[in-house]
């Protein structure tokens, strides 16, 4: 059963998304809860009880001294009671004859429970009007009590009711928590480093950048995953190399019978009735040689070329210039500099294939490049030809499938393979020129 917590979407936005962040959060939350429970148990129960008993003790001594003065009134008796209280109880007493309290209760509050507990003890035990000031003198608490003949001014040591260890306890809790969290973060960072390097290697390998074997590190499971990735990547490299070499060999071997067919057609006397058929066969042979040459060029650069930072705009200028020299009308729109990490020869071949496909079926071609956010760039090839029906656009990428105007070939298939090897993709859309648009999306 899937439980949906309140504010679940807000929590997803606030909580960290990285593995290191979530791991540290899993350590930090129980640590903070543990320290909060320890602080509550110590501060909320034990420490509160100790403060209450200290307050009751001080108030009891004050009440005992006032009771003595009430039992033995007069200045003579007060002269021996006050020094006795100062000696045995540690607070100073002074009577202000005829004075009256202006304020009652707690006048100056301080941080902690001791002021509130002392105020409650004075109300419960003395049953007299009083006021209390914790900031009158450093290290002392001033208590003024209304008597019948004046105001008794008492200056009690603050240490009698304030332990002063709460800040040391809180500092100890925070310090040990910070130390434990720092040690845990250090260990977790070392463990996550292996996973991060594995993720970077997988991402780079997935977009056609071969980082080479990665060094297994971290926990046993992470080392096993890194070793498995190295073996998988090696098998994929071997498969691609063998496939490319095999198909390149097959394509190269096909040139021999094609050359014999071309020579046979050239020397064969063709009657007038078969002249058009012979010309068609020669055109088919030219088309097959062109496709073989394109695939051989693709196969030669497939495994050897490595991705590097390249100016994509310079590649577009070069491709557009070559197309114009071949007689095509190509309009170019690209920024001054567009640095992307790619395999320049392969990307140049893919864009050339798209332009060649467009110029075969249209009279005008438009080539443009723009940034698509911060993590991608896009290249568009537009033409004013007949276009391709939406239902047939995916089939146009299949090798030797019918294209926009009935031609067959490998151009679109090779272009898509190259772009997808870079982690991007090619889509076919309706063009603003009225024909077909080929949109290339490449990651930055």
Image: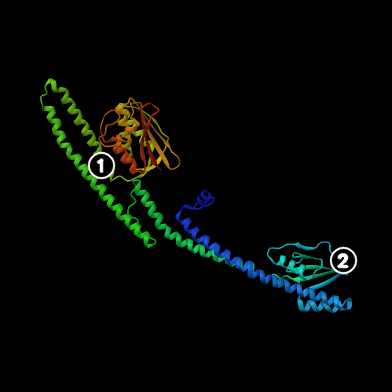
Residue beneath the point at 73% across and 72% down:
56
Quarter holding the C terminus is top left
**Which SS class for mark 2?**
loop
In this orientation, which residue lies closer to the viewer: 69 or 185? 69
Q: Position of residue 152 (x, y in %)?
A: 83, 70
- State the image quarter where residue 258 is shown: top left
Neighbour tally class for label 1: few under 14, some 14-19, many 20 plus, Cα within 10 Å: many
Q: Is residue 120 left or right of residue 78?
A: left
Sequence-first tag of 1 and 2: 2
Q: Residue at x 82, y 74 (%)?
A: 66
**Height in image: 442 above or below 160?**
above
How many C-alpha atoms fall within 10 Å of the one at disc 2: few (<14), some, or many (≥20)?
some
Report if residue 94 is visible in the image. Answer: yes
Examine the rendered structure and indicate whether residue 134 appears above or below residue 349.
below
Q: Is residue 325 above or below residue 131?
A: above
Q: Which residue is mark 1?
A: 299
Identify the residue position indicated by label 2 in the image: 99
Please tell me which residue lies in front, 283 or 111: 111
74 sits to left or right of 250:
right
Q: Position of residue 389 (x, y in %)?
A: 34, 30
Distance Cα–Cα, label 1 vs label 2 = 107 Å
């Amino acid at each position: 059963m899937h439980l949906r917590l309140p504010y679940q979407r807000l929590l997803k936005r606030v909580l960290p998304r990285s593995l290191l962040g979530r791991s540290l959060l899993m350590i930090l939350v129980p640590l903070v809860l543990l320290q909060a429970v320890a602080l509550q148990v110590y501060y909320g129960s034990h420490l509160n009880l100790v403060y209450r008993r200290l307050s009751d003790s001080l108030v009891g001594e004050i009440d005992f001294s006032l009771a003595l003065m009430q039992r033995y009134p007069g200045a003579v008796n007060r002269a021996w009671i006050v020094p006795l209280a100062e000696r045995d109880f540690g607070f100073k007493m002074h009577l202000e004859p005829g004075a009256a309290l202006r304020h009652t209760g707690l006048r100056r509050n301080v941080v902690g429970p001791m002021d509130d507990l002392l105020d409650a003890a004075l109300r419960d035990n003395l049953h007299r009007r009083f006021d209390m000031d914790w900031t009158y003198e450093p290290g002392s608490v001033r208590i003024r009590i209304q008597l019948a003949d004046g105001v008794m001014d008492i200056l009690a040591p603050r240490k009698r009711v304030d332990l002063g260890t709460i800040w040391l306890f809180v500092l100890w809790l925070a310090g040990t928590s910070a130390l434990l969290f720092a040690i845990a973060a250090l260990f977790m960072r070392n463990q996550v480093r292996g996973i991060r390097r594995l993720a970077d290697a997988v991402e780079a390998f997935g977009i056609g950048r071969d980082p080479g074997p990665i060094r297994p590190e971290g926990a046993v499971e992470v080392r096993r995953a890194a070793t498995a990735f190295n073996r998988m990547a090696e098998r994929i490299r071997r498969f691609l190399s063998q496939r490319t070499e095999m198909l390149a060999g097959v394509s190269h071997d096909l040139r021999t019978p094609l050359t014999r067919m071309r020579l046979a057609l050239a020397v064969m006397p063709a009657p007038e009735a078969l002249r058009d058929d012979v010309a068609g066969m020669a055109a088919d042979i030219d088309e097959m040689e062109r496709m073989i040459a394109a695939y051989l060029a693709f196969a030669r650069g497939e495994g050897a070329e490595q991705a590097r930072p390249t100016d994509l705009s310079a590649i577009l200028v070069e491709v557009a210039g070559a197309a114009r020299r071949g007689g095509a009308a190509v309009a170019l729109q690209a920024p001054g500099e567009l640095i992307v990490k790619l395999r320049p020869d392969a990307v140049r071949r893919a864009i050339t294939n798209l332009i060649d496909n467009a110029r075969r079926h249209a009279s005008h071609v438009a080539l443009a490049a723009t940034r698509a956010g911060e993590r991608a760039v896009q290249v568009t090839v537009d033409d004013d030809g007949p276009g391709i029906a939406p239902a047939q656009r995916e089939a146009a990428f299949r090798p030797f499938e019918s294209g926009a105007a009935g031609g067959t070939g490998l151009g679109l298939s090779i272009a898509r393979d190259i772009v997808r090897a870079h982690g991007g993709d090619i889509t076919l859309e309706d063009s603003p020129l009225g024909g077909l648009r080929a949109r290339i999306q490449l990651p930055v």
